[in-house]
Amino acid sequence: MKLPKALQSKLKLREENNALRYLPLTNTLVDFASNDYLGFAKNELIFDVSHQLLVNQNLKINGATGSRLLSGNHSLYPLTEDFIAQFHQSEAALIFNSGYDANVGFFSTVPQRNDMILYDELCHASIRDGIQMSHAKAYKFQHNDFLDLEKLIHKITSNFQLPASIYIVTESVFSMDGDSPNLEELTNLSEKYNCYLVIDEAHSLGVFGSQGEGLVQSVALHEKVFARIMTFGKGLGCHGAAILGSNDLKNYLVNFARSFIYTTGLSPHSVATILMSYRQLIVQEEALQKLKNNIIHFNQEKMRLGLKPLFVYSKSAIHCAIISGNQNVKTTSELLQEKGFDVKPILSPTVSEGQERLRFCLHSYNSHHQITKVLELLSSCVFK
């Protein structure tokens, strides 16, 4: 059966704009594309100890069998949530099936009709989708611009009926830029106006802190944040997410977050992998240090080759070179891939038109030679 004409037209427009998405095939190129920052997705030890935990717990089953409120709350869930809460110095943790589910569940449920949500204009699609489902009013502020945020707070509190609660929403590392907000300035602003601060740490977990605990905790501001969203598909190399906060927040989400209530729970194997990946963070100092060294080396080579003006400022594992135009950035990406390096183009409309970019994801298993070589190739493409 053919697609409706309206859907055909939308696909055709994407194709005409050179922005049609395809599912990529597996390749053997040098990895500068995946979110597996510490190599945990390929870590055989994590695989083996996760299996052994299931055997020890007598959980030789393939699925959760139902939602967590019915039959799916197997014994590994409380064990893992308690470990996560302790690791992140949080009162409680609640596991969701994915980072998308966590953000949609939180933002569609927690802010109420008389509340206000103020979010960074570059927040992830999952945050924006959750906000769209909320009954609260929402306004975006300019990226990492807290003067603009403060002006917005003043405008809202003076021109509207005073909201019951104000939620400020941002990310500790932005997925399409790799940059970070000034968290100290942000927490001060949040306290000044008695706001609830919510921070998505998807691309911070496993990258920042002495044990990869994330940026907020590494600068000792976790007690000033109302909720942190930790996603496991990046630095932990597995799947799922957790919302960190108070016991009351956890109880509220269990009762009202639809993306938690109305879905089958994660399998015992998935939850075991989360727990063992967290335990590996504690002992895997070498991988974290290699990643940090690679980030430093990437920035040094960027400077040496005169590429700094191309890149968004970043001290994270994500580095983006702005190459405007879908065709331009795709051509550059294809040239790097032909030389053996998997560097993906990020096209509009994923990013704003004119902000198309090459996105370099760094890993503990990338060598300094690989980093130097791929940046030298980029330099030859840009300065030819």
Image (spheres, rainbow, N blue to C red):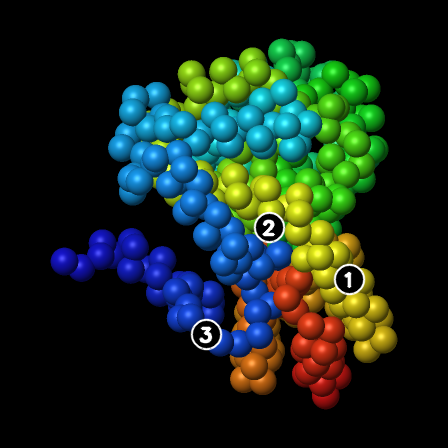
* Residue at horizontal 40 percent and vertical 27 percent from the top: 75
Q: Which residue is mark 1?
A: 293
Q: Residue furthest left?
A: 1
Q: Which residue is mark 3?
A: 27
Residue 236, x across and y down, in percent: 56, 48
Residue 304, x across and y down, in percent: 85, 75
Q: CA distance from mark 3 to mark 2?
A: 21 Å
Query: Based on the displayed image, in which of its 4 quarters is residue 204 positioned?
Result: top right
Q: Amino acid at mark 3?
A: Asn
Query: Are dots 3 and 1 in contact, CB under 8 Å?
Result: no
Q: Residues within 10 Å of mark 3 (few under 14, many from 20)?
A: few
* Residue at horizontal 37 percent and vertical 28 percent from the top: 74
Q: Which residue is mark 2?
A: 235
Residue 376, x across and y down, in percent: 73, 81
Residue 126 in sight in this render: no
78 left or right, relative to 228:
left
Q: Amino acid at mark 2?
A: Gly
Closer to the N terminus: mark 3 or mark 2?
Answer: 3
